[in-house]
Image (cartoon, rainbow, N blue to C red):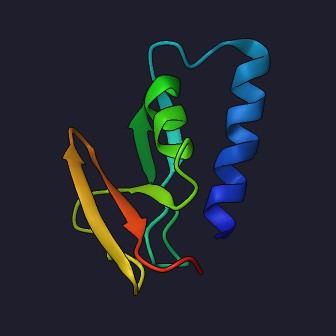
Amino acid sequence: MLFREVNERIRSLHQRSDSLAGGGEWVCECADPGCFEHVEMCMADYEAIRAHRYRFAALPGHDLPHGGRLLERRRGYVIFEWEEAA
């Protein structure tokens, strides 16, 4: 997914500056390729999601990709996972 690549670059920049200890903005990883909205979460939460290869974060109410299932609702975002590896 394109937005995962964008978020990985954001993570790399913030790791160098250690600027996301309290929180930061990430690109929504929903199914809409035209969505450029931001998801707020701290680096530790982003890292926990990324620890699972097929897990992603999106804004509540945004469409999940076909084959994705909702895992968890958190304040300001949801976590979903691909049921089948794409």
Image quarter hosting the N terminus? bottom right
Q: Pinpoint residue 39: horizontal percent, then vertical percent.
A: 41, 46
Q: Pinpoint residue 78: horizontal percent, then vertical percent.
A: 29, 53
Q: At 48% from the left edge and 24% from the top edge, which residue is drawn?
A: 44
Q: At 40% from the left edge and 64% from the top edge, which residue is drawn?
A: 81
The quarter holding residue 80 reads: bottom left
The quarter holding residue 10 reads: top right
Question: Where is 2 relative to 18, above or below?
Answer: below
Q: Residue furthest bottom?
A: 66
Image quarter hosting the C terminus? bottom right
* Left or right placement of residue 21 versus residue 70 in this view: right
Q: Name the residue nearer the viewer: 46 or 10.
A: 46
Question: Where is 36 relative to 42, above or below?
Answer: below
Q: At 46% from the left edge and 79% from the top edge, which residue is drawn?
A: 32
* Left or right placement of residue 1 versus residue 66 in this view: right
The quarter holding residue 69 reads: bottom left
Q: Name the residue nearer the viewer: 7 or 55.
A: 55
Task: Give the total number of marks visible in the rendering.
Answer: 0
Question: Where is 21 relative to 59, above or below?
Answer: above
Q: At 32% from the left edge and 76% from the top edge, which residue is drawn?
A: 63
Q: Name the residue nearer the viewer: 20 or 84.
A: 84
Q: Pinpoint residue 46: horizontal percent, then vertical percent.
A: 50, 36
